Amino acid sequence: MRLAHHCLGTVEIAPDPLLPPRGMRLVADGGRHFIAKQHAQRDRYAGELRAYEAWGTHLTGHAPKLVGRDDATLTLLLTALAGDRADSAAPDSAQEELAHREAGHVLGKLHRATPMPQGGAVGAALVARFRSWIARAVHADLIDATEENLLEHHAAILGTSQMDSAVCHLDYQPRNWLLGDTFGICDFEHMRRDARVRDFARLEFRHWQAAPHLRAAFFEGYGRPPNDAERRLLESFGAIEVATALVKGHQENDPALSAHGRTVLSRLI
């Protein structure tokens, strides 16, 4: 609130049940809406701050703007985008399909503005993070030896693959999209340079398996579908999805996330 008063003057708190516990919707004079977001971890705060400062210009009109910050309390003050969360769209509706098409268009803008050619560095960094998740899954007894070998097989594929990179959102799915007069995206705390194809992974394994028409709509907006090599890479990114879902589901006592990890693992097997 001190940050909001300093940057905006008089504000009121507006209830918003969709915000996480460390988020707050504020209304300033003139009815302008803002979001205050406080991080629990300094690296997440630094990552999201860097995303807004370095890459927000590539998403003008589609992303919140940074209004203020408080490094001591790890708090960001952002403009609030108007619209409804895309995960509230009715399944199989025209609105849901439109959301995926617009999502592809906006992500394509970010990727095309920040490309780097193929190289091994991205794969090496990915594998290091991936193997740490595998180790955590083994330590918690969440996978058996056969499953560990399967995940290690995909780690080896990623480690030897040449892949192009771009600035990626890395949690790109309907809960972070807003449907209003313009299409908006939020939650930039995971954003960093990574393998471009990886930005499709959560959609592929959490939303498109039972709805291939949404995949088609997304890539129509994006500008082109993945080629054969990229589709094979996407399968290996599914292995990362397995490890992270199993570990986080276990740590956070989230049965749905754990079940998702097992479902993707069954597909890979």
Image (cartoon, grey):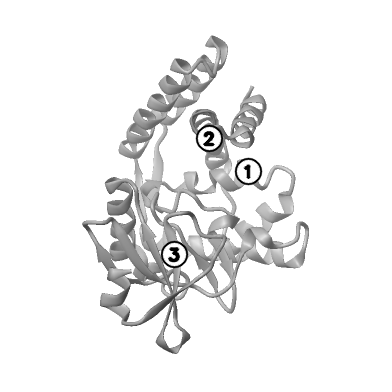
SS at badge 2: helix
Q: Is residue 160 visible?
A: no
Left or right for 213, reference 53: right
Question: How much space separates mark 1 and mark 2, taking CA atoms?
Answer: 10 Å
Amino acid type for the residue under numbered disc 1: Arg
Q: N-terminal of the two: label 3 or label 1? A: 3
Label 1 close to label 2 by CB (< 8 Å): yes
In x, y percent, where is residue 229?
Answer: 53, 39
How many circles with numbers are drawn on the protein?
3
Amino acid type for the residue under numbered disc 2: Glu
- Which residue matches tag 3? 24
Asked whether 148 or 197 is in front, the reply is 148
Asked whether 221 or 58 is in front, the reply is 58
At 55% from the left edge and 12% from the top edge, which residue is drawn?
Answer: 144
Rendered view: 192 above or below 247: below
At 56% from the left edge and 60% from the top edge, which residue is drawn?
Answer: 18
Quarter of the image with the N terminus in it: bottom left
Label 3 close to label 2 by CB (< 8 Å): no
SS at badge 3: strand
Mark 1 surroundings: few (<14), some (14-19) or many (≥20) residues within 10 A: some
Mark 3 surroundings: few (<14), some (14-19) or many (≥20) residues within 10 A: many
Question: How much space separates mark 3 and mark 2, taking CA atoms?
Answer: 30 Å
Residue 206's disc is 1
Question: How much space separates mark 3 and mark 1, taking CA atoms?
Answer: 28 Å
Q: Residue furthest top?
A: 145
In x, y percent, where is residue 132?
Answer: 38, 26
Rendered view: 169 above or below 186: above
- Which residue matches tag 2? 241
Rendered view: 87 above or below 34: above
Q: Nearer the viewer, mark 3 or mark 1?
A: 3
